[in-house]
Image: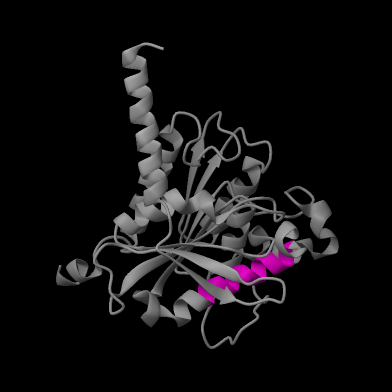
Amino acid sequence: MNRKALYILSILLTSHILHAESSNPDQKIEFKAFKKSGIKLHVFKPEKWKKSDKRTAIVFFFGGGWNGGTPKQFYPHCRHLSNKGLVAISAEYRTKKSHNTEPLHCVEDGKSAIRWVRKNAGVLGIDPKKVVAAGGSAGGHVAACTGTVSGFESESLKISSIPSALILFNPVCDTSPAGYGNSRLGKDWMKISPLHHISIKTPPTCIFHGKADTTVPFSNVFQFKTKMDELGLRCELHAYEDQKHGFFNFGRGNGSAYTDTVKKMDSFLDSLGLIGNPKKRNKK
């Protein structure tokens, strides 16, 4: 390898190391305890963060078919949004591998996470009226359920588990026989099928999905948007030609899909007044 190639390689390695370091969460907080092990929120805070702040919070749920996965999947998204002024969180939830649980428990934990964040707004320095749920694949399903499905609440209903908005990356929106995961859910499929629980209470939604996705069919998000449109609800669907499952992840391909989806995510949040410095916004 010549000197120029070594120099370029060293730059790339340094860049990846710096990114990895900057992507580590500032804090991990257990929000739900179990006999085997509790589950935590991996919290990313903006510069000059204070407990007295009234910032937007966004909670990401990782993908993994309800079987496994890691909160690290959304560390890059969290650090990016914390740099934009949000308190960004990548949440753990029980899976088949970690706690021998089923998808119904994943939904329950997703709701618990949103409720805990809202309940502890004063600790996190956020506005309880500005809590966004986000996620990818099965994690997108968990996020979507927080904004659509009733029940599966394990805490007091005095504090809502419904987020202010949804941001979904190749999510499971349909668990019917025509969708994803039906064989796993059996007769319980309709209980946690977001498509079949859309109502006028469903929050504004932004979806990113590849048209070549063979894991979670594009048709399931197209139907979700169609139903949202029929009810006059806001739903942005960004379709990506020739892109397969997980196309949006940091480090995937040449990085263009990650960059484009993050840019559109920022735009969606900004259009709802959920990004940037809240104090500056109030002065306008």
Using the rendered image of the protein, determine whether residue 148 is visible from the camera's viewpoint: no
Q: Relative to 213, is 123 on the left or the right?
A: left
For the N terminus, the image quarter is top left
Residue farthest to the left? 283
Viewer-nearest residue: 106 or 213: 106
User: Residue at coordinates 76% horizontally, 47% vertically from top-left?
Assistant: 178
Q: Determine whether 117 is above or below 133 in the image.
A: below
Residue 81 position in % (x across, y down): 36, 55
Q: Relative to 211, is 104 on the left or the right?
A: right
User: Residue at coordinates 46% horizontally, 52% vertically from top-left?
Assistant: 75
Q: What segment carries the magenta color?
A: 103-115
Residue 63 position in % (x across, y down): 61, 51
Residue 144 position in % (x across, y down): 58, 61
Viewer-nearest residue: 161 or 37: 37
Using the rendered image of the protein, determine whether residue 41 is visible from the camera's viewpoint: yes
Q: Determine whether 210 is above or below 175 in the image.
A: above
Q: Determine whether 201 is above or below 178 in the image.
A: below
Residue farthest to the top? 2
For the C terminus, the image quarter is bottom left
Occupied quadrant, residue 212: top right
Queried whether the magenta region covers residue 104, the answer comes back as yes
User: Residue at coordinates 71% horizontally, 61% vertically from top-left?
Assistant: 98
Which secondary structure dominates the residues rendered in magenta? helix
Q: Relative to 174, is 146 on the left or the right?
A: left
Residue 54 position in % (x across, y down): 30, 75
